Amino acid sequence: MSFVTSEEMMKEADKNGYAIGAFNVENMEMVMAVIKACEELRSPAILQTTPSTVKYAGLDMYYANVATAAKKASVPIALHLDHGSSFELAMQALRAGYTSIMIDGSHDSFEENIAVSKRVADACRPNGVPVEAELGKVGGKEDDLECDDPGYTDPDDAVKFVNETGITSLAVAIGTAHGIYKGEPKLDFDRLSEIRKVVSIPLVLHGASGVPDESVKECIRRGISKVNFATELRIAYSDGIKAFLKENPDAFDPKKYDAVGMEHVTELVKNKIRVCGSENKA
Ligand code: 13P
């Protein structure tokens, strides 16, 4: 049985200086492709869905899909709600069987963010389900989420936030953004080290698509233990299908073109697992 919560795998990563890749999935094919990469490299991983993904097919559909694949997998797999946009959605995910939850109150005031994050953490704790929350604002656009007013995480606020909410991991804003970068992102590594010095729970990096591998590795060296990748997976999947259909314009069997999309996703995820250093950590 390898369908697990994200808590143990993140604690192990945190203790041993590597990170768990958290990969956004949109459909059955992406779920299978990510788990294949994890099995080939013997890596634990988190599969996650955003609110707009959940809107597309429903929490129960993604739960059934990931739980079925994870139970058959030979490596630990967790299912995480990414950017849970309300207490209600977080509770729906908990009831659906998600094994890891993010509540994102980063667009509210500091006090409101504390209140909603604490409420979700309190509700999930008795169920043994870990809770990630975000402080500061990660910029950029992903799905329906858009932030054109990013703000960096303040280390002192982070201490207060973690103490008052009882969350189990903290997403920090240090200069990454969701989606495609126009230029090379400028990351505030020193800020990350400052946060690491004063916050003892695992730290999470959002917006890792397009961040150079060396920068992701530097973030992990400075204390990140979960790295989120979404846009690059979507591009890999679509590029694989586009290339197949260009070569085979008369193809009509989804199994044929999806297989190529899946191969592209598996290759990408294997690269990201190596960047995270989680190979052979299953
Ligand atoms: P990217 O789309 O930039 O990879 O961001 C992923 C993410 O942070 C999901 O929460």
Image (tube, helix red, strand yellow):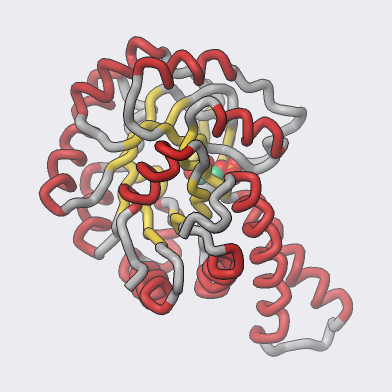
Q: Residue at x 55, y 33 (%)?
A: 220
Q: Say how many tags the image has.
A: 0
Q: Quadrant of residue 11?
A: top left
Please determine whether, in this image, residue 184 is positioned above or below residue 121. above
Q: Residue at x 18, y 51 (%)?
A: 128
The quadrant of the picture showing ligand 1 is top right
Spot occupied by residue 243 in the image (x, y as percentages of width and height): 82, 70
Please determine whether, in this image, residue 232 is positioned above or below residue 74. above
Please determine whether, in this image, residue 63 is positioned above or below residue 215. below
Q: Which one is in front, 52 or 41?
A: 41
Which residue sits furthest left? 126
Q: Is residue 151 left or right of residue 105?
A: right
Q: Residue at x 78, y 69 (%)?
A: 242
Q: Residue at x 22, y 48 (%)?
A: 88
Say whether residue 61 is visible: no
Q: Which one is in front, 95 or 127?
A: 127
Which residue sits furthest right? 247
Say whether residue 271 is visible: yes
Spot occupied by residue 152 in the image (x, y as percentages of width and height): 49, 17
Spot occupied by residue 33 in the image (x, y as percentages of width and height): 59, 70
Spot occupied by residue 73 in the image (x, y as percentages of width and height): 44, 74
In which quadrant will I find the N terminus?
bottom left
